[in-house]
Image: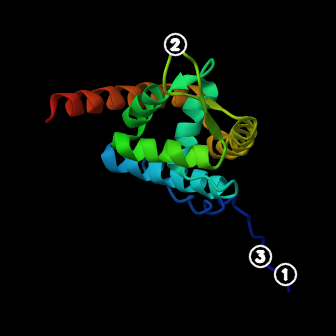
Amino acid sequence: MTTPATTTASTPSPAPPAAPAAPAAPALNGRVIALAHYAARAVLETVLTRYDLTFQQSVTLRVVAVADGPVTREEVVDQVVDSLKIGAEEVRGVLDGLATAELVAAVERPTVAGLVAITDAGREVHARTTAATGAVSARIYAGIPAEDLAVAGRVLGLVTERANGELAAGR
């Protein structure tokens, strides 16, 4: 018995299932900025605890570390208050703690009172924490296009400027 000849028509194979769409990027707003800030800060604080430093101590130590030489306590206080939006007395307490830990020290000069400078131990801690947080930051920012980082930097700079303006106006 012969079988009838069959023609094989070329039928397209079914399309593979579509990959799930990537979630839309959230619009930039205070919540998105805060979530990024607190996530990054938590990572930073994890690194800083290895060196027995708090976030406030790290910020304050950096001000002294990057100065060209001894700096007045009040200059340090003003810069940290401006950066962290905390009270001057709190910053003075942080400076006292850094002095107790021998990371900064008072400098006596007859012409200028209230100077502080970073100690060798403070310079070492600052260098180590900067290197460790730099490595973490490199992993966090890896793969983000430079153009996107530039735009984010401009936008966040503008947000900071406007928020500082609101604070200065007392609104």
- Percent position of residue 64, x then y: 58, 30
Residue under numbered circle 2: 111
In the rendered view of the protein, which quadrant contains the N terminus? Answer: bottom right
Residue 4's place in the image compared with 44, above or below, is below
Q: Nearer the viewer, residue 124 or 118?
A: 118
Query: Residue extending furthest top?
Result: 111
Element at label 3: loop
Distance of label 1 from label 3 (alpha carbons): 6 Å
Judge from the rendering whether residue 151 lies leftward or rightward of residue 119; answer left or right.
left
Q: Earlier in the sequence, mark 2 or mark 1?
A: 1
Q: Earlier in the sequence, mark 2 or mark 3?
A: 3
| Structural distance between the alpha carbons of marks 2 and 1 | 115 Å
Q: Is residue 85 above or below residue 66?
A: below
Q: Judging from the image, what secondary structure is the residue with disc 1 in? A: loop
- Marks 2 and 1: which is nearer the front? 2
Q: Residue at x 70, y 35 (%)?
A: 119
**Residue kind at label 1, given as amino acid type:** Thr
Q: Which residue is mark 3?
A: 4
The picture quadrant where one finds residue 79 is top left
Q: Residue furthest bottom?
A: 1
| Residue type at tag 2 | Thr
Does 74 sit above or below residue 37?
A: above
Q: Quadrant of residue 126?
A: top right
Disc 1: which residue: 2
Amino acid at pointer 3: Pro
Q: Residue at x 55, y 46 (%)?
A: 57
| Disc number lying in front (2 or 3) | 2
Vertical order, 152 against 34 (above or below): above
Helix, strand or loop at mark 2: loop
The local crowd at label 3, few if under 14, some if 14 to 19, many if 20 or more residues have their Cα within 10 Å, is: few
Give how far across and how far down residue 143 sits, in percent. Answer: 66, 39
Task: For label 1, count other residues whose C-alpha is less than 10 Å away and answer few (under 14), some (14-19) or many (20+).
Answer: few
